[in-house]
Image (cartoon, rainbow, N blue to C red):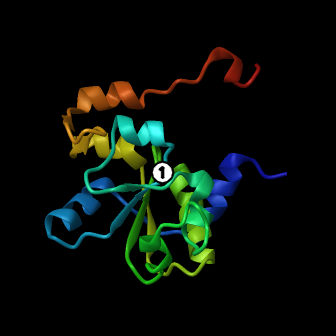
Amino acid sequence: MKRYDDLIADALTRVKEILPWDLDKRLKAGNAPLLLDLREPSEFAALHIPGSINVPRGVLEQACEWDYDETIPELVTGREREIVAICRSGRRSALAADVMQQMGFTKVVSLKLGIRGWNDAELPLEDAAGNALDADTGDELLASRVRAEQRKPK
């Protein structure tokens, strides 16, 4: 039986990653890929990389195809476009990038370290209203919320 970490490790054998500071350099150089944030809408609203779009992981496959309520034309027609998949830690985005590659996306990569790494590097983040957020606020919003009952028994 595979566990979550096994699935991620397996996906990373096929998925390329980009580090936050390398992505920032590309964005500043005007070579902007599509920034695809796979977190839930509430996570995205709290903070995200400016210019990114939100497609929750749970509807990704439908968003990449025509004729679904979740269809995102920019994705359907972007199979040859450079895309950076983004999540909180780089784990969901690795799985999503792997699925997207299976669906024919040829230039999709995962943001290694995710939004947390982006925030740790003190790169720009904004909230749903477009207000800039500082790294300390980012730390608070990105802090782990694992409750005691969610921890592995000892």
Place of residue 46 in the rendered image (x, y in percent of width and height, measured from the top left): 36, 34
The residue drawn where x is 38% and y is 28% is 141
The residue drawn where x is 59% and y is 67% is 98
Give the left or right position of residue 33, taking residue 25 as reference. right
Give the left or right position of residue 20, taking residue 39 as reference. left
Location of residue 139 (image quadrant): top left
Q: Which residue is mark 1?
A: 90
The mark tally for this picture is: 1
Give the left or right position of residue 98, taking residue 80 as reference. right
Question: Is any part of residue 145 visible from this angle?
Answer: yes
Q: Residues within 10 Å of mark 1 (few under 14, many from 20)?
A: many
Question: Is any part of residue 12 visible from this angle?
Answer: no
The residue drawn where x is 50% and y is 76% is 76
The residue drawn where x is 15% and y is 63% is 28
Q: Which residue type carries mark 1?
A: Gly
Above-or-below relation of 9 to 26? above
Q: Secondary structure at mark 1?
A: loop
